[in-house]
Amino acid sequence: MSDRRSAQWYGGDDRNSYIHRAWMRRGLPADAFDGERAHIAIANTASDLTPCNAHLNEVARSVADGIHRAGGIALNLPVVSLGETQVKPTAMLWRNMAAMAIEEMLRANPIDGVVLLGGCDKTIPALLMAAASVDLPAVVVPGGPMLTGTFRGVPLGCGTDVWKLSEEVRAGTLSAAEFQRSESSMIRSRGHCNTMGTASTMGLLAEVLGMTLPGIAGTPAPDSRLLEAAHATGVLAVDLVDQERRPSAVMTRASFHNAIVALAALGGSTNAVVHLLAIAGRLGVELTQDDFDRIGAGVPLLVDLQPAGRFLMDDLYRAGGLHAVLAEVQDLLDPSAITVIGEPLVSALGTAQVYDREVIRARQDPLQMEAGIAVLYGNLAPDGALVKPAAATPALLQHRGPAVVFDSVEDLHARLDDPELPVTADSVLVLRGCGPKGYPGMPEVSNMPLPAKLLAEGVRDMVRICDGRMSGTAYGTVVLHVAPEAAAGGPLAKVRTGDMIVLDLENRRLDVDVPAEEWAAREPSAEAAKAYAAPTRGWEKLYVDTVNQANTGADLDFLLGSSGDQVARESH
Ligand code: FES
């Protein structure tokens, strides 16, 4: 019998093999079962309710053509899909569910390898977490960003400009009708958000991790070169199976090192921290939140993309793309990391060129000298909190101000614009109850809107602190992913309006300036606890009962580590 995994289903002459073969004969030729041809699943997150991924069925056809051309059998496998803008209360609540479901389906089915099609924020992380756990030969096709739309003659960055335009409406400088008119301009084409948000970041990092055909990441979704690369990925998938090159051989500690360097140089999303930690956790790769600060802190910001800068993903691709950026920081990359083609990542960078120095800056002329994500510790964040200096107001990164505390997002919305709210530009907005357990799902609410009365005064940024996440398309002096979260007994639950908060980026500190004895004796807010989630059934209950904190990737505690591709028992 062939030693292909699929042959364990199809290769025998017993009743079970008969059943496995017979039901698959609809459309598959007899030689599909001779053990010679690799059976490749196309794990496809296409869905009408995930508009950023809706074009992936077309991409899947190109992948399938490539698989067939290389002699493999292509099998479409629709998997759980998450539309970031559509699902409530937050797509992050189901990242782990998607990863778990995909993992189980990859293991349960008669396949030898898998091509992973994702795009919208959580889809590539979930696919990579699943592939890491099952460890079948796997390769990603990132769905690609949408083209740049314009409004009033200027480009609109999806996500980022929603926040900006909605603040303009609140400040009275943009009419509601004009705001609405911008909607159809923002989403110009198929593809995911075109800022350096989470989808763009994770698509690019999938390549830096070695998990894509080199050169594919960042190709705009409508660009015909995406389909060409999808076809080539199908061919590659068959070779991957033949070579038995598995995610654990590709995504090594060296790959994660490179991903952290790239994350900083690109000015990527803070969400990448929880996603990379979660993927590493599935592989058993030692990676901590501190690695992001340690490896990324000295990396310069080279890419002038929104939300930190001006341009959009289409511009990055035109300017030379990911390889041109990586070539600028090649000396910081670990040359031992390989990609799915079996060669070092750095060997693909020799021909990279920058065609627009406005978009991709030279190493000696960066947008910022130190661009990484900083990890803060202190009596407000014993297990750490993140801040992205590239998206913040530099003057606010050393700041001392009185807290204005909100117990929930609903509390924030109810009181933020109250003229009596005791808030000034120096205040620190604190929002709790938004961590993995508290909300549940750790929503992207940390970039709280500013109080209307301050907006009217021209204030455009304040220090904000939250145990939730922030959209990768958002910006501002936002301290987020505070761990442990308030609902898990974190000290954020004890802060009161009026307490002095000290943010000290230089020393990587986040503290509340309350006498130690008083702080130790203070009880968590009972009022805040009323807002924490207390689900009694279904996924939400499993999630709240078992989710880890943000500083280790917010995966479920029982999903850490590899599970492998073996299934011990038969189905009949
Ligand atoms: Fe899908 Fe932004 S909503 S990537």
Image: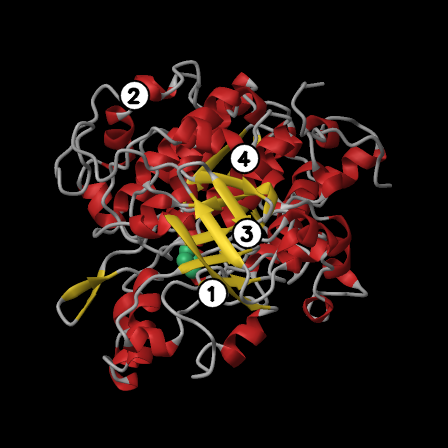
Q: How far separated are the C-alphas under marks 2 and 1?
A: 35 Å
In screen coordinates, is 375 left or right of 185? right
User: Ligand 1 appears in which quadrant?
Assistant: bottom left
Q: Write down the residue under mark 2.
A: 330
Going by the numbered disc 4, the residue's amino acid type is Gln
Circle 3 SS class: loop
The residue carrying mark 1 has its beta carbon less than 8 Å from ligand 1: yes
Residue at point 78%, 41% (across, down): 19
Q: How far separated are the C-alphas under marks 4 and 1?
A: 27 Å
Q: Nearer the viewer, residue 145 or 468?
A: 468
Q: Write down the residue under mark 4.
A: 289
Mark 2 burial class by Cα count in 10 Å: few <14, some 14-19, many 20+: some
Name the mark on residue 85: 1
- Residue 534 image point, x, y percent: 76, 65
Q: How far separated are the C-alphas under marks 4 and 2?
A: 23 Å
Q: Nearer the viewer, mark 1 or mark 3?
A: 3
Residue at point 66%, 32% (across, down): 134
Q: Nearer the viewer, residue 281 or 212?
A: 281
- Residue 191 image point, x, y percent: 36, 55
Q: Nearer the viewer, mark 2 or mark 1?
A: 2
Q: Write down the residue under mark 3.
A: 513
